[in-house]
Image (spheres, rainbow, N blue to C red):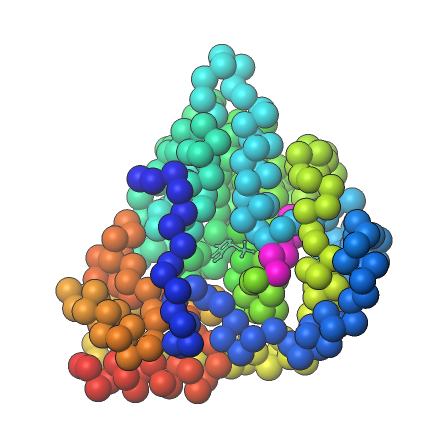
Amino acid sequence: MSNTYHRPAPTGDGLRLHLNENTAGCSPKVLEALAHLSATDIAFYPDYDVVYREAAEYLGVADDRLLLVNGLDEGILMSTIGALLRRPDDGSRPEFIVINPAFDMYAITARACGGAVVNVSPRGDFEFPLDGVRAAITPRTRLVFVTSPNNPTGVRVSNDAIQSVARAVPAGAVIFVDEAYHDFCGDTALPLVDSCPNVVVGRTFAKAHGLAALRVGALMAVPDTMDPLRAVTPPYSLNVAAAVALRAAMADRERLAWYVDQVKQSRQLVYEFCTKHGFTFWVSGANFVLARVGPQAGSIVSRLAAAGIHIRDKSADPGCAGCIRVTTGIVEHTRRCLDAMEEML
Ligand SMILES: Cc1ncc(COP(=O)(O)O)c(C=O)c1O
C-alpha cells in the first residue's frame, strides 16, 4: 500500500457526493464573519483565547482537554507522532492497529512516520471486531484507530467496545476515537476519557459544519494525554480564517440542525432505493451510505461521473467488494443521484 494520499481528480462543477463533504456549503454566517477579517487580522499571528473558550464550551470539555488542529488529518498526524515518541522499551517499531475497512489516512500516516501497521480484518457485517482487535494487541501496540461512525461503512462502535480496547492495550498506548461524523448520530466516547485516560477523541468541522477547505479539527483528552500532543503541534496551526469561521459555524446551530435533518432524510432515501433494488446496505450514523451493488459498482461510478455526479467505488477496500459509497447531503442532491442511478439500472 502507498504511503501517499492520492487526491481525487478535480470534479469541475459536478455534484460531489464522493468525499462526504457538506453538499450545502458552509453557513452564510461563516462567509459574513470571513468578510469582516481586517488587514491586521491577517498580518498578525492569531490569538486563540476566545475561539478556545467557545469551542471548549461547544464541545463540552474544559480548555485544558482541548486542542484545535488544522483539520482532523493533523490530529491523526499529531497522535501518530505522540505514539512514536513512546517507543517500546525494546526499541522495536511501535505498532498501529487499523480496523478495516478504514479511513486511508491512518495507515498512510503511521507508515509514513515509520510505524508498523497491524491490520484487523472486518467482520462480514462490519460490526466492530472486538476479538480481532484484542488478538492484534501486543506489547508494542502504541495506537489503536477506532472510527465511530466508521468510514466507509457508517457503522457505529459502542462505548463498551471502546472501553474494552482501552483496558486491553499496554501502558503508553492510546485509543484514537475518530468522531469525524459525530454530528450525524450524536454518539461520543467523550464520557470515557476520565475512566480511560488513554482515550483521545477526534472531531472535525469539515463535515456537518462545512469547513473542509479551511481545515479545522479538534482533539480532546485528559491533560496528561493531551499535553504531549499539544507539545508537538505547531503553535499557530489553526489559521485566523479557520478560527473566525469556526466561531461563526458553532454559533449557527439552526443551520447545523437543518443540515443534519437533510442528511437523515437523504440516508432514508438511499436505504429505500437499495431495498427496492435488492442491494445490501449498512445503516449509517454518518453523512454517507455504503451499499453493495455487485460487480457493476465500477461501471455505475464511472457512468455517473460521466453525467457529472461523483460517488465513490469502494470495491477495493477490505470486505467491500462490489460496494459504492454515496454522500447523503441535501435531499435534492441525493434525489438527483438516485434518479440517475435508477435510469442506469
Ligand atoms: C474518518 C475521518 N477522519 C478524519 C477525516 C479528516 O478530517 P479533516 O478534513 O478535518 O482533516 C475524514 C475525512 O474524510 C474522515 O472520514
Establish if 31 lies above or below 122: below
Image quadrant where one finds the C terminus: bottom left
Image quadrant where one finds the N terminus: top left
219 in magenta: yes
Q: Residue at x 29, y 66 (%)?
A: 324
Q: Quadrant of residue 124?
A: bottom left
Identify which residue, 121 or 135, lies in the foreground: 121
Report whether residue 97 is seen. yes
Q: Position of residue 51 (x, y in %)?
A: 78, 58
Report whether residue 186 is seen. no
Establish if 144 lies above or below 59: above
Establish if 186 lies above or below 25: above
Q: Which residues are magenta?
A: 214-220
Number of labels in the image equals 0
Q: Position of residue 291 (x, y in %)?
A: 29, 68
Identify which residue, 333 or 59, lies in the foreground: 333
Q: Position of residue 180 (x, y in %)?
A: 54, 58
Q: Residue at x 49, y 67 (%)?
A: 21
